[in-house]
Image: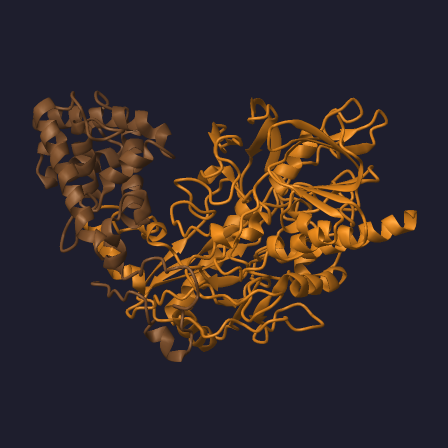
């Protein structure tokens, strides 16, 4: 598929822009994202990569969680923008209080501990009310799952990453000629992408 | 200014309203069919797993409009929350031509004889308004048959020894070939003495009614059928109604209230049209078919000096006994792969546990589920498996293609205080009070649901599941797509809203024809029963009309 590598390259460009913007402005200046400052965007991608971490296959960060959220927070999920703004700031305050640096600067294991703390509802009240911390974690967890396992048209699941991983074929082209329901057709669907699961 | 008078105005072009429209129009009555949603077609199958009627984090698939139609839900602890149609607490059913039948999974069950005689069968259940219907299965049988043939049902019931008596077989054979889950579950059920058979579905398995058969894709429940093989009112009776020339379908028209004259007699309907203009449609007959929540809301919002508490509500019955189905069951992890991407996946059922469960006042059908999308499955991990992180990802890889889910609609014990009211403060886009939902499930419903889940688990273990986990119900409100019960059918006006013919007590020209009239909701998906009731009510309406000349 010709558009595949192009889209990946474009993503890398955007990611690089985001990273450099963050380095220069520390989140204050111009952000390439519509719903996040550059620093917020980095934190979102970092959380996403802990919710679905990269291993032999890409994690949610590489699969476009940030792109998904940036688009959807400007549309159907717009009512959660405030929750993200407040939650991401609180997460960094908590991170600085406990580890002396922002969330994105932590090792993966420390990031996991912090997120588990939010999930358990026991995050220190100075930074959070417990219910808010848990609610924020649940929000990001659910949205990350949407981005990673949902349809790529919404900005995540880049190149059908997760469907490939699970062995789920992409949506078929309209029409019925691709469906051979004779005995053998069920075993090997002609014309359809065959992906094997790795599990 | 009022529009010109018609014989009948029907509010809601769903499973009930579509059928009544066709029956009355074919009998020569002039009919206006109002629908608040749009008329979608097979080309609106977007295969969007984040925006459909089953899973909607990014919106509903087929309405209602996400910004104009809020509802208030009161939790069991008294907390009030506002919900939009795509959010879980809203209890949505699609708002479009065809209603739920446009995007449903299309299971086509007849209730059993005992489902109409629950009180006689099980006695009173404390804390529940469980009762007998004023009609029997035998009264409804001819209309079940009519629904099966006119709308179109496929399946094979020969393996079901528990089914109620029927005169004719289903018009279409079961889907073929069978999917992998069917092949695994069938011998497993037979091994442990159960009676498995092919799920009856409002779905073409062969060409029928001028439309082709199911193409077995996974975009089924919650989606529009891309090849128009699912049979709903949108592609059967509504086109027939329009073809008579006697029926006018008006889409994007939202009913405001039912109008009455100074004597309290119903005279028509006021509604907001697609341009938000207030219109008045006078009619000889008014038929409310807006589904259990919105039908009750419309009656309650139709207040006048003669009817200060809303229409049909002089005994405070409208909106009571709100129910749906308590879905429970189990998921099993097998050693071999069973995912074959052959839709709709749901294929095999048992009715061994609908009735006769020791100590329980009911039960329900159990069947394998429709295909779970990856996002749905990601949120359904068992206890002990982390909900995120490396272990969750590994679980997804290991389990997605190796799991089977068996679930079913547990018969609910109706609760008097589970109800629809109109909210004193919250208004919709047009300024009308919104539905206010409150109450919860009866404790015995939850007991029955647990029993059903354990039976599902037993079946899965017999099928070779190496790990199983149960899906159980909480105490919260149940309604959703199977919403029912809010305008109960009965002979006593003090404890019901409509009579055996779906006519509202004390009115000669006001009817409710949808799931609202169900006395209970059976242990089955309720749509075929709803359709049969719509045919039965239409039969009465037509005969009554002729008698009056």
The N terminus of chain A - image quarter: bottom left
Q: Is residue A53 above or below residue B304?
A: below
The scheme the figure's colours follow is by chain
Left or right position of B99 against A136: right
Compared to residue A159, the image places residue A193 above or below, namely below
Chain that is coloured brown in the picture: A
Name the spot of residue B137 as percent of width and height, x first: 72, 61
Residue A23: give x, y in percent of width and height: 8, 27
- Judge by depth and name the residue closer to the eye, B507 or A179: A179
Please name whichever residue, B484 or A89, is drawn nearer the observer in this view of the structure. A89
Q: Is residue B422 left or right of residue A45?
A: right
Task: Depth check: give the residue in front, B461 or B202.
Answer: B202
Residue A50 horizontal/vertical position (percent):
18, 42
Most foreground residue, B125 or A74: A74
Q: Residue at x 46, y 54 (%)?
A: B328
Q: Which residue is situated farthest in the bottom direction here?
A: A183
The quadrant holding residue A77 is top left
Residue B532 placement, left or right of B435: right
Residue at the spot x=26%, y=48% of the render? A157
Q: Is residue A101 visible?
A: no
Above or below residue A90? Residue B419 is: below
- Residue at the far front in the pictured view: A2
Q: Which corner quadrant holds the C terminus of chain A? A: bottom left
x and y, in percent, of residue B354 in the image: 57, 62
Instruction: Give the total of numbered labels.
Output: 0
Q: Which chain is the one coloured orange?
A: B
């Amino acid at each position: 598929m010709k558009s595949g590598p192009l889209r990946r390259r474009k993503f890398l460009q955007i990611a690089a822009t985001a990273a450099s913007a963050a380095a220069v402005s520390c989140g204050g200046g111009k952000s390439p994202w519509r719903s996040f400052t550059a620093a917020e965007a980095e934190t979102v991608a970092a959380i996403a990569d802990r919710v679905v971490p990269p291993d032999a296959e890409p994690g949610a960060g590489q699969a476009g969680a940030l792109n998904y959220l940036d688009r959807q927070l400007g549309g159907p999920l717009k009512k959660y923008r405030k929750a993200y703004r407040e939650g991401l700031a609180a997460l960094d305050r908590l991170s600085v209080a406990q580890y002396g640096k922002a969330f994105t600067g932590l090792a993966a294991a420390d990031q996991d501990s912090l997120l588990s703390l939010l999930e358990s509802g026991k995050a220190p009240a100075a930074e959070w009310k417990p219910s808010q911390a848990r609610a924020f974690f649940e929000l990001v967890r659910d949205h990350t799952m949407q981005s990673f396992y949902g349809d790529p048209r919404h900005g995540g699941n880049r190149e059908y990453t997760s469907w490939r991983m699970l062995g789920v074929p992409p949506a078929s082209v309209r029409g019925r000629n691709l469906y051979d329901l004779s005995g053998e057709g069920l075993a090997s669907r002609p014309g359809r992408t065959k992906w094997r699961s790795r599990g | 200014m009022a529009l010109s008078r018609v014989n009948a105005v029907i509010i809601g072009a769903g499973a009930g309203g579509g059928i009544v429209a066709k029956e009355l129009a074919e009998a020569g009555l002039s009919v206006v069919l109002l629908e608040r949603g749009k008329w979608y077609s097979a080309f609106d199958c977007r295969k969007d797993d984040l925006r459909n009627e089953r899973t909607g984090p990014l919106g509903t698939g087929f309405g209602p409009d996400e910004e104009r139609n809020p509802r208030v839900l009161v939790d069991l602890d008294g907390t009030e929350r506002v919900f939009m149609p795509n959010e879980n607490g809203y209890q949505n059913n699609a708002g479009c031509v065809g209603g739920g039948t446009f995007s449903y999974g299309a299971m086509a069950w007849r209730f059993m004889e005992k489902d109409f005689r629950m009180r006689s069968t099980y006695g009173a259940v404390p804390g529940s308004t469980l009762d007998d219907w004023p009609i029997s299965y035998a009264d409804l049988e001819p209309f079940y048959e009519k629904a099966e043939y006119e709308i179109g049902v496929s399946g094979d019931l020969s393996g079901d020894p528990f089914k109620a008596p029927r005169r004719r077989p289903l018009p279409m054979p079961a889907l073929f070939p069978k999917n992998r889950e069917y092949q695994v579950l069938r011998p497993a059920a037979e091994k442990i003495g159960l009676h498995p058979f092919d799920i009856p579905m409002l779905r073409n398995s062969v060409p029928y009614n001028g439309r082709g058969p199911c193409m077995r894709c996974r975009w089924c429940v919650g989606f529009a059928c891309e090849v128009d093989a699912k049979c709903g009112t949108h592609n059967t009776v509504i086109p027939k109604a329009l073809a008579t020339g006697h029926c006018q379908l008006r889409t994007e028209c939202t009913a405001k209230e039912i109008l009455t004259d100074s004597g309290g007699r119903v005279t028509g309907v006021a509604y907001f049209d697609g341009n938000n203009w207030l219109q008045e449609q006078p009619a000889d007959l008014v038929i409310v078919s807006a589904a259990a929540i919105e039908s009750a809301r419309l009656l309650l919002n139709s207040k006048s000096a003669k009817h200060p508490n809303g229409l049909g509500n002089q005994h405070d019955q409208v909106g009571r006994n709100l129910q749906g189905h308590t879905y429970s069951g189990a998921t099993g992890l097998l050693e071999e792969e069973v995912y074959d991407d052959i839709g709709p996946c749901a294929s095999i059922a048992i009715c061994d546990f609908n009735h006769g469960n020791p100590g329980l006042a009911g039960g329900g059908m159990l069947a394998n589920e429709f295909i779970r999308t990856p996002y749905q499955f990601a949120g359904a991990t068992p206890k002990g498996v982390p909900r995120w992180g490396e272990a969750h990802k590994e679980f997804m890889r290991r389990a997605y293609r190796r799991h089977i889910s068996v679930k079913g609609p547990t018969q609910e014990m109706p609760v008097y205080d589970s109800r629809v009211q109109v909210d004193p403060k919250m208004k919709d886009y047009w300024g009308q009070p919104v539905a206010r939902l409150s109450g919860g499930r009866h404790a015995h419903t939850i007991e029955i649901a647990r029993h059903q889940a354990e039976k599902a688990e037993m079946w899965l273990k017999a099928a070779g599941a190496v790990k199983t986990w149960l899906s159980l119900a909480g105490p919260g409100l149940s309604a959703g797509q199977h919403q029912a019960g809010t305008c109960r059918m009965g002979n006593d006006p003090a404890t019901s809203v409509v009579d055996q013919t779906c006519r509202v007590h004390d009115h000669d020209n006001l009817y409710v024809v949808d799931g609202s009239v169900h006395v209970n909701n059976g242990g089955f998906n309720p749509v075929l029963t709803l359709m049969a009731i719509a045919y039965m009510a239409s039969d009465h309406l037509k005969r009554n009309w002729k008698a009056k000349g």
